[in-house]
């Protein structure tokens, strides 16, 4: 068994899980929801195994390091964290239908990684040879994943809220009655961000600590740092929205979606469009 | 103070206490920060300037876009954020403090109505016996209660982690602590840069703002080396450094290894591996076409020499083995750039092992001078970033405070339980500052357990 084979199994599992969730939403057959989550768990397990295997394979090649060192590995890890956070939410609240709005993010990541990227294991460049890499990347990506889940929930919120406003009673439309009430969606959104915000904060702090350790400056306003701060500001605004009349409900849902868009830009856009010190996706200094 | 003035101060105060301002500031900061990620910060490089128009350049300069995170308007926003934060805290803290320090000990009917979680049942025990039972119950199940008698009724009050209500204020305080740390760093610290040739030492560094700083000691570079992976990618950049006080090596700082991600700190000044280069010399001779009047020319990477015919020459690149570029040749070679006295330049490869090729080249190009390459002497230098930041510990303190504060704000909850014994009825009520759903569940369990203990009945 090789890690790349296992990654393929895991990608197909996410695809099947997503389709099952779609079918569940359309048909309201409970068994489909259960099957969807079961396949998602299976995929998560396969992916966990694959990541561990890839880690071991890098040691077998004599360039051993945690599989978090390039764009391919980070996208895979991101996808893993999204399903992990979704699984935790599912264990606690059991709103299966959320899977239909979260699994696509995980699937998109895995498909892109498997089909569009070079998956070779490479040795670690000097800039990344630090334990801080592990702390920094893990906290950041767990935070990003929580924001991805919050974004999926916010999209559900907006769909449901628009539907409720347009006057139809719940229950009239089969799909809408599957959605949790908007009050619950609003609460889940908040909870997901309450998981993500502390993790992002830790991610920024560990990043600053690493930068200080490696370059002597904890903050140099490099585009990636700045974008992570932008994301942080948006979610800080979201948290305060709770206390400000007029900034709850739909606006909070939009803030959460904008926050995730900024997160994705921070993660990918900065590397693709802007230059800086962070070395995922090429470039970077020593 | 006139009434008008007082009104003005009042509205100022309300303005700074408002959470709408907070939202505005947080979102503005998020949006405005984008500018500096698109426009390069610091002295703009010429490659960038040619891509924008003159007017744009002047506009950006005037608005401070080339150093926007230090521009007055960005700093103003940060100050407003700080004032907003402090004002909000001053306004709300007394109320929160009162909740913590003077809790309502008595379950009045008004309080009872405001509680989301409550239960009530009959109990035939005598009030003072009941009081003891309930005290024991709360102590073992929740927290030690305060018992109060009011209007002939007994009231019990117990709470858990009241101080976690302060967590949010610690988060806010941490933001200010971090600002203070950053300020101290920028006032009393510096960031600089220095190149040291192998075998040489320096005692001064240049800061980013172009100031020269005397370290008060010397730093010697004993060696610099690069290690590569099998595939040619860099594996390690390593400097061996020695700190010297009055020319004498300091014992624990002799032959210290500095690599990327592993700096050297001495007397609060830290040296980070950041770049490297070759400052070695290249040796040439210049002669006429007949090989007579040969004179030596020595160059290093950054200098150029003037040749007898008035043109200048500089080294672009040099190698010890040219075969990797031109497969059927071997030995050292250098690519040099020759600038004619009337302008115009050409690049020429000069070989060490093939004097006839050098002559032929001169002939073909109607030149009167022949260059011969005699080889190079390597001398590596290490490029170190130098930083001194006495505020950094305050920044880490602020960060720790923030993490603890966020933990308290999100994951802890101030939970309160009241019990009243009145006319043979036991009424229990409670609330929590966070996570209502979990508390509801907990409260339900607690109330039915209590009822079972007192009355033996299962259901509430
Ligand atoms: C302009 C500056 C700010 C002001 C005026 C402000 C004000 C407030 C106020 C009044 C509250 C409600 C406290 C309460 O429950 O009584 C609050 C909550 C909070 N603030 Fe801020 N804040 C500011 C900036 C920040 C920043 C930069 C952060 C980033 C970490 C932050 C994190 C929080 C958190 C985590 C909460 C608790 C939210 C919750 O419990 O859901 N605040 N803030």
Image (cartoon, rainbow, N blue to C red):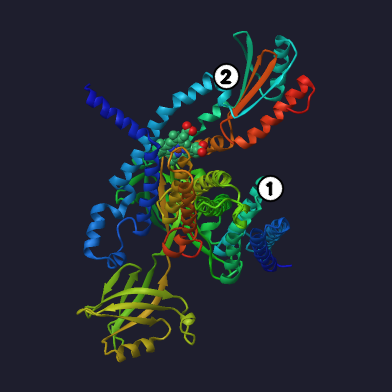
Residue A78 point in image, percent of width and height: 58, 57
Could you say which is closer to the camera, residue B114 or residue B63?
Answer: B114
Horizontal relation, residue A54 to residue B4: left or right: right
B32, above or below B45, in the image? above
Q: Which residue is mark 1?
A: A91
Q: Measure how far apart labels 2 and 1 are at the Cα level.
A: 39 Å
Horizontal relation, residue B404 to residue B194: left or right: right
Residue B260 point in image, percent of width and height: 50, 55
Within-10-Å neighbours for mark 2: few <14, some 14–19, many 20+: few
Residue B332 point in image, percent of width and height: 44, 78
Say whether residue B294 is visible: yes
Could you say which is closer to the camera, residue B142 or residue B58?
Answer: B142
Which residue sits furthest left? B342
Which residue sits furthest top? B152
Q: Which residue is mark 2?
A: B109
Task: Name the residue rendered at 29%, 78% in the picture.
Answer: B338
Could you say which is closer to the camera, residue B105 or residue B341?
Answer: B105
Residue B447 point in image, percent of width and height: 70, 26
Please report, as a chain letter, where disc 2 is located.
B
Element type at mark 2: helix
A260, above or below B163, in the image? below
Could you say which is closer to the camera, residue B326 or residue B422?
Answer: B422
A270, above or below B149, in the image? below
Within-10-Å neighbours for mark 1: few <14, some 14–19, many 20+: few
Say whether residue A284 is visible: no
Q: Quadrant of residue B458?
A: top right
Element type at mark 1: helix
């Amino acid at each position: 068994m090789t890690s790349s084979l296992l990654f393929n199994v895991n990608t197909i599992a996410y695809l099947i899980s997503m389709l099952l969730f779609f079918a569940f939403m359309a048909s309201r057959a409970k068994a489909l929801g259960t099957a969807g989550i079961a396949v998602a768990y299976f995929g998560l397990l396969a992916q966990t195994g694959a990541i561990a295997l890839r880690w071991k394979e890098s040691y077998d090649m004599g360039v051993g390091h945690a599989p978090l060192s390039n764009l391919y590995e980070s996208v895979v890890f991101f996808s893993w964290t999204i399903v992990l956070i979704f699984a935790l939410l599912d264990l606690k609240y059991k709103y299966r239908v959320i899977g239909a709005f979260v699994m696509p993010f995980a699937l998109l990541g895995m498909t892109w990684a498997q089909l569009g990227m070079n998956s070779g294991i490479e040795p670690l460049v000097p800039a990344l040879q630090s334990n801080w890499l592990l702390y920094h990347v893990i906290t950041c990506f767990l935070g990003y994943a929580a924001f991805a889940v919050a974004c999926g929930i916010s999209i559900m919120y907006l769909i449901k809220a628009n539907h409720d406003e347009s006057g139809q009673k719940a229950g009239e439309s089969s799909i809408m009655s599957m959605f949790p009430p908007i009050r619950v969606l609003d609460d889940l959104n908040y909870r997901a961000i309450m998981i993500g915000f502390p993790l992002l904060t830790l991610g920024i702090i560990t990043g600053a600590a690493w930068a200080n350790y490696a370059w002597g400056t904890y903050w140099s306003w490099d585009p990636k740092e700045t974008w992570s701060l932008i994301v942080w500001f948006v979610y800080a605004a979201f948290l305060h929205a709770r206390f400000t009349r007029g900034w709850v409900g739909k606006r909070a849902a939009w803030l959460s979606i904008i926050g995730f868009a900024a997160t994705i830009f921070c993660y990918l856009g900065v590397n693709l469009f802007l230059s800086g010190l962070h070395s995922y996706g090429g470039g970077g200094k020593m | 103070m006139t009434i008008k003035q007082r009104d003005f101060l009042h509205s100022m105060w309300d303005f700074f206490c408002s959470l709408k301002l907070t939202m505005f500031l947080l979102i503005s900061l998020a949006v405005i920060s984008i500018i500096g990620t698109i426009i390069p910060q610091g002295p703009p490089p010429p490659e960038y300037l040619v891509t924008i128009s003159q007017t744009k350049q002047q506009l950006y300069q005037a608005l401070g876009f080339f150093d926007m995170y230090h521009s007055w308007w960005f700093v103003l926003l940060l100050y407003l954020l700080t004032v907003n934060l402090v004002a909000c805290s001053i306004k709300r803290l007394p109320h929160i403090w009162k909740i913590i320090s003077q809790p309502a000990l008595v379950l009045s009917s008004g309080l009872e109505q405001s509680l989301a979680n409550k239960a009530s049942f009959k109990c035939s025990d005598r009030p003072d016996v009941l009081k003891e039972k309930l005290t024991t119950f709360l102590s073992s199940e929740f927290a030690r209660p305060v018992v109060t008698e009011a209007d002939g009724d007994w009231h019990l009050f117990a709470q858990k982690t009241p101080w976690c209500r302060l967590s949010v204020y610690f988060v806010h305080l941490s933001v200010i602590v971090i600002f203070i740390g950053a300020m101290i760093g920028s006032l009393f610290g510096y960031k600089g840069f220095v190149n040291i040739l192998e075998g040489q030492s320096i005692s001064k560094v240049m800061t980013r703002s172009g100031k020269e700083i005397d370290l008060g000691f010397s730093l010697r570079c004993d060696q610099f080396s690069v290690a590569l992976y099998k595939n040619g990618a860099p594996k390690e950049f390593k400097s061996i450094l020695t700190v010297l006080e009055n020319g004498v090596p300091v014992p624990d700082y002799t032959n210290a290894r500095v690599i990327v991600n592993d700096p050297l700190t001495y007397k609060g000044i830290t040296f980070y591996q950041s770049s490297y280069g070759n400052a070695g010399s290249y040796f040439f001779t210049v002669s006429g076409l007949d090989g007579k009047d040969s004179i030596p020319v020595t160059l290093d990477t950054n200098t150029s020499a003037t040749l007898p015919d008035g043109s200048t020459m500089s080294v672009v690149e040099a190698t010890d083995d040219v075969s990797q570029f031109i497969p059927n040749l071997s030995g050292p070679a250098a690519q040099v750039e020759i600038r004619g006295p009337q302008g115009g330049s050409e690049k020429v490869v000069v070989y060490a092992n093939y004097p006839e090729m050098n002559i032929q080249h001169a002939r073909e190009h109607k030149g009167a001078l022949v260059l011969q390459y005699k080889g190079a002497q390597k001398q590596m230098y290490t490029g170190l970033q130098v930083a001194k930041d006495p505020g950094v510990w305050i920044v880490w303190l602020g960060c720790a405070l923030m993490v603890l504060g966020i933990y308290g704000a999100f994951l802890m909850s101030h939970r309160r339980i009241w019990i009243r014994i009145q006319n043979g009825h036991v009424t229990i009520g409670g609330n929590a500052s966070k996570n209502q759903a979990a508390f509801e569940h907990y409260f339900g369990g607690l109330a039915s357990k209590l009822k079972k203990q007192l009355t033996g009945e299962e259901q509430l």
